[in-house]
Amino acid sequence: MLVCDSCCPDVNPVKHFQRIKVDNEKIRLIMISESVPPHIPDYFDGKGIPAFIKNTNTLFDRIGYAYKTYEDYLNNGIYLTTAIKCVKKEYLVSAKTIEECSFLLEKEIEPFTHVKVILLMGDFAIKSMNYIWKRKHKQRIIPNGPTYKIRNEEYIHSGIRFIPSYTQTGDSFAIEKSKIRMMEEDIKKGMDII
C-alpha cells in the first residue's frame, strides 16, 4: 500500500491509489496520465465505465483494440495510472508537487519487472518520469521541449521504450483533434512493441 505524508499546497489532500488487484508479471505497458480527476469515481478503477476509461477506450478503439473496462487493460498487460495522486486545485501544479508524487509513482510501478513500454501521457507524466530517472540513473530520460517536437524520437533505457505524448484524461480530449491523432499514433507505437 502506498502512503503519502506530503502536504502539497497546490493539490487537495485527497489521495487516490489503485483499488484493483494487478498481476505484476503480466504488465508489459504502463500508461501514465497526468492527475487524479476532481471526481474520484471518474478514475480508471471507478465502477462501470468511468470518464478516464471512456477517453482511453476511444483512443484504443481507434487503433483496433476494443477494450471496455480497466480489467480488459490489465488482462492485456496494460497498467493505467497517474503521475499526481491527488486532485489538482488549479490547472497546473508546481515542480515540487510533481517531484513529491514521483516517489509514489516510482514505488507503484517498481513491481512491474517485465515492462517493455511506458507511455507518458502529458507533461506531468514526463516530468515525473524524469525525476525518477534522475534519482536512479543520474540523467533524465526525456529531454526538455514541446511534446510535438520530442514525441517522434526513440527513448530507450534498461530495455524499456519511453514514449512522450499528450494526456487523454482531461477536458482538452474532446477539443484538440490534432493531439488525439498524435496520441493514437503514440499508443499504436507502444502496442506494436508489446
Image (cartoon, rainbow, N blue to C red):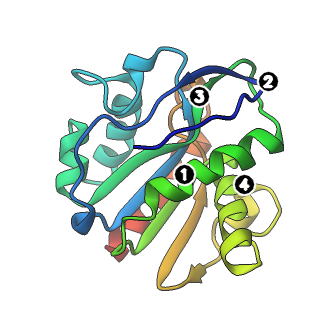
**Disc sitting over residue 127 in the figure:** 4
Percent x, y for residue 131?
A: 72, 61
Q: Going by the image, does 176 lie left or right of 160?
A: right
* Amino acid type, residue under disc 1 in the picture: Leu
Q: Residue at x 72, y 28 (%)?
A: 7
For disc 2, the marked residue is: 9
* Secondary element type, mark 2: loop
Spatial separation of the CA atoms under disc 1 and disc 3: 12 Å
Q: Going by the image, does 95 lie left or right of 192?
A: right
**Disc sitting over residue 86 in the figure:** 3
Query: How would you rate the neighbour count of disc 3 (Cα within 10 Å): few for under 14, some for 14-19, many for 20 or more?
Result: many
For disc 1, the marked residue is: 105
Earlier-in-chain disc, 4 versus 3: 3
Earlier-in-chain disc, 1 versus 2: 2
Q: Residue at x 29, y 63 (%)?
A: 27
Closer to the eye: label 1 or 4: 1
Percent x, y for residue 167?
A: 57, 42
Q: Residue at x 45, y 64 (%)?
A: 110
* Amino acid type, residue under disc 2 in the picture: Pro
* Amino acid type, residue under disc 4 in the picture: Lys
Spatial separation of the CA atoms under disc 4 and disc 3: 16 Å
Closer to the eye: label 2 or 4: 2
Spatial separation of the CA atoms under disc 1 and disc 2: 19 Å
Give the vertical position of 51 relative to 159 (above or below).
above
Q: Are marks 1 and 4 in contact (CB under 8 Å)?
A: no
Residue 14 versus residue 58: which sits nearer the camera? 14
